[in-house]
Amino acid sequence: MIKIFPFIFIILWSSAFITTKPLIDNSDPFSALAFRFIIVAIGFFLYSVFTKNKIIIKSKYLIEAFLSGILFHGLYLGGVFYSVSKGMPTAIAALIVTLQPILTNILSNPILKEKVSFNQWLGVFLGFVGATMVIGLDIGSNIPLLGLIATIISLIAITISTIWQKKLSNNLPLSVSNMYQAVGGFVFHLIIITLFVDPYINFTKTFILAMTHQILLVSFGAFTILMLLIKKNSASKTVSIFFLIPPTSAFMAWIFLNEKLTTLDLVGFLITSIGVYIATRNSVN
């Protein structure tokens, strides 16, 4: 069953980029995320109680999960949502964040003592080339400075959070860990709202549908699978599948949003798939 998890993760995580813009159009980014993660925290709490997992845990484990949530749900997602709200094209934001496997490969050896093989580096290179071909970069487009800075912060945050998650004690049930991570994300966004933002949410039908999608399929589905993959595999191999996210997002946009998909895009998708295969083969049991 675990062998199919990376493919499910790619589809679910990629779909989040399709529903980010509708959320931003109907709320400020931090209110949307605060609302999302309080619901997610409650959901994992109820599931943990139902499955009789211990909610009261050692302070060490609580702090670890809480900080992981700040990195994943706070800085990473907050940066992506904020960049989109400032006019950063979603595709370019996705491509910048997709640099994560390169940074993770660089840091995995000194921090996690993981050996990064030649095949992994080759796969990462092909993955980046393919993703770039699919997304493309319009040099003439106006990329907002604040959006760019926020996206770079997101890139750094998700890289650090992936390595941090791999170094954690991993002594918590997944639902309990996810609950405290969601609490960390909620508290982070609540602080941002309190100090810096004039919060608002328009509970339109579009907002509700997009939020439901991100809560159920992304937070409960994709994020749980990601935590499982990080626990079961090396950090450097796990994140290599992120290169498939921009092409998959582009493919979804072609299907659901009628966005253009060219022959070059398809070639890029193929190159990316080959790169991810080379980087991750024999890594998922």
Image (cartoon, rainbow, N blue to C red):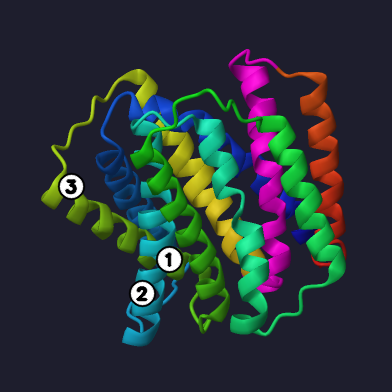
In this picture, which residue range is highlighted in magenta? 231-260
Question: Mark 1 or mark 2: which comes first in sequence?
Answer: 1
Tag in front: 3 or 1? 3
Would residue 91 be counted in the magenta stretch? no
Residue occupying image coordinates x 41% and y 59%? 44
Q: Amino acid at mark 3?
A: Ile
What residue is pinned by disc 1?
48
**Which residue corresponds to mark 2?**
55
The answer to whether any part of residue 184 appears in the image is yes
Residue density around tag 3, few if under 14, some if 14–19, many if 20 or more, within 10 Å: some
SS assignment at label 3: helix
Instruction: Please provide percent x and percent y for residue 217.
Output: 53, 42
Residue at point 16%, 42% (across, down): 197
Q: Residue at x 53, y 29 (%)?
A: 18
Pick the front one: 57 or 146: 146
In the image: residue 185, left or right of residue 20: left
Identify the image quadrant of the C terminus.
Answer: bottom right
Where is 257 relative to 123, above or below? above
Q: Which residue is mark 3?
A: 193
Q: Secondary structure at mark 1?
A: helix
Gap between marks 2 and 3 measured at Cα: 28 Å
Residue 94: percent from left, percent from top: 56, 40
